[in-house]
Amino acid sequence: MKKFQIAAIPGDGIGKEVVPAAIDILEAVSDLHGGLSFEFTDFPYSCEYYLEHGVMMPDDGVERLKDFDSIFLGAVGNIKLVPDHVSLWGLLIKLRREFEQVINIRPAKIIRGIKSPLVNPKDFDLIVVRENSEGEYSEVGGRIFRGEDEISIQNNIFSRKGTERAMRYAFDLASKRKKHVTSATKSNGIVHTMPFWDEVFEDVAKEYPDIQTDSQHIDALAAFFVTRPEKFDVIVGSNLFGDILTDIGAAIMGSVGIAPAANINVNGKYPSMFEPVHGSAPDIIGKGIANPIGQIWTAKMMLDHMGEEEIGTVLLDVVESVTNDGIITPDIGGKYTTQEVTAEIINRLKAKA
Ligand code: NAD
Ligand code: IPM
Ligand code: MN
């Protein structure tokens, strides 16, 4: 019997609604698959935790989490309680960095029964590899002076090592898919970093002669995600470009509520962390209508990462059978609640047992 130790951090807002739903699903998955079980340990790290303790997680938080097989996170952020830059640097970004989760993978594809807002969507199936530790999200910079002379500076940092690592990850992934990598660049407008990015891309591409490549400026690429997403296979982008592109990827699937993500620790030293693309959705907290599919599909990515691809595929197939029957939440045009969608997925998983 394989038992996975999972640290669950529901976090803020709808994270507290969709993480328990996805955990119920994972329990049903383990019942379906006799040889597999999960032990979940809950961690209350969140903005409410901050109000009580003055920190987003305790000093030994990283130590407490480091031996888990995976971290399963909902969302972080509640600006009514704590400014975003405090909560995010104190928890989400801190975990990504401490655990060297240097790659963020975010797929987008047509899901049966979920209507894309595109008028004539072709059957796209793409995956964004987002550099997850540097680029525009550097810690170098700050605010200087006050008043009318105030200046705010953010230095973008692109290391050769970090850039190559993200690109190699993308090429390796493309070798198992349609063998095409698109680089998200902006070498026409952002001096220094993007011509460097292009140079590294060309160097890495030479190591993969059987992979086709192209390079698109991020502004045009954002538009192509809307006008011809079916032309893409793997897209590699910097931290910020990858962030923005993946909300577009989510939108063309039908909702940011269904898009999954995985923060990957590539050196195997620390746990990887699985959290959907969406945030804490302050406008729908407590209404019971948060779409659980982003978190559930994220659970599938966690299963894949832990070597359980077969059961992950069964899970996504069951999810698609439910969406295909119109049992969906309001963000994608349905009338069902988080609970009802979750219960139906569980029923259908049980029926397979
Ligand atoms: P958001 O993703 O929380 O919400 C954007 C829109 O999408 C809202 O209308 C929301 O209701 C809707 N939405 C999101 N998830 C949904 C779901 N599962 N079902 C149905 N509708 C859903 O983005 P935002 O408003 O920019 O951010 C809100 C807070 O979340 C901020 O504090 C932000 O910093 C934080 N955030 C955290 C993460 C994370 O922890 N990974 C990611 C993004 C944003
Ligand atoms: C995401 C989020 C985060 C990011 C924020 C909340 C810091 O938007 O995971 O997509 O920009 O990485
Ligand atoms: Mn984002």
Image: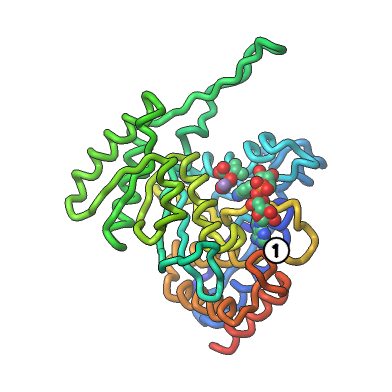
Compared to residue 241, the image places residue 44 above or below, namely below
Q: Residue furthest right?
A: 52
- In this view of the protein, which residue sits in the foreground, 232 or 200? 232
Which corner quadrant of the image does residue 26 belong to? bottom right
- In this view of the protein, which residue sits in the foreground, 184 or 122? 122
Compared to residue 353, the image places residue 42 above or below, namely above
Q: Residue at x 53, y 40 (%)?
A: 98
Q: Position of residue 307 (x, y in %)?
A: 42, 67
Q: Position of residue 90 (x, y in %)?
A: 65, 38
Q: Is residue 31 left or right of residue 216?
A: right
Q: What kind of residue is marked 1?
A: Ala
Q: Position of residue 91 (x, y in %)?
A: 64, 42
Q: Residue at x 34, y 50 (%)?
A: 169
Q: Secondary structure at mark 1?
A: loop
Is the distance from the Cβ of mark 1 to the nearest ligand 1 atom less than 8 Å?
A: yes
Q: What colouring method underlies this structural image?
A: rainbow
Q: Residue at x 52, y 34 (%)?
A: 137
Q: Is residue 279 visible?
A: no
Q: Is residue 79 left or right of residue 144?
A: right
Q: Is residue 301 visible?
A: yes
Q: How many residues crowd mark 1 within 10 Å: few (<14), some (14–19), many (20+)? A: many
Q: How many marks?
A: 1
Q: Position of residue 21 (x, y in %)?
A: 67, 68
- In this view of the protein, which residue sits in the foreground, 118 or 256? 118
Q: Which residue is mark 1?
A: 290
Q: Residue at x 44, y 28 (%)?
A: 157
The quadrant the C terminus occupies is bottom right
Q: Is residue 135 left or right of residue 44?
A: left
Q: Is residue 311 left or right of residue 90?
A: left
Which corner quadrant of the image does residue 62 belong to? top right
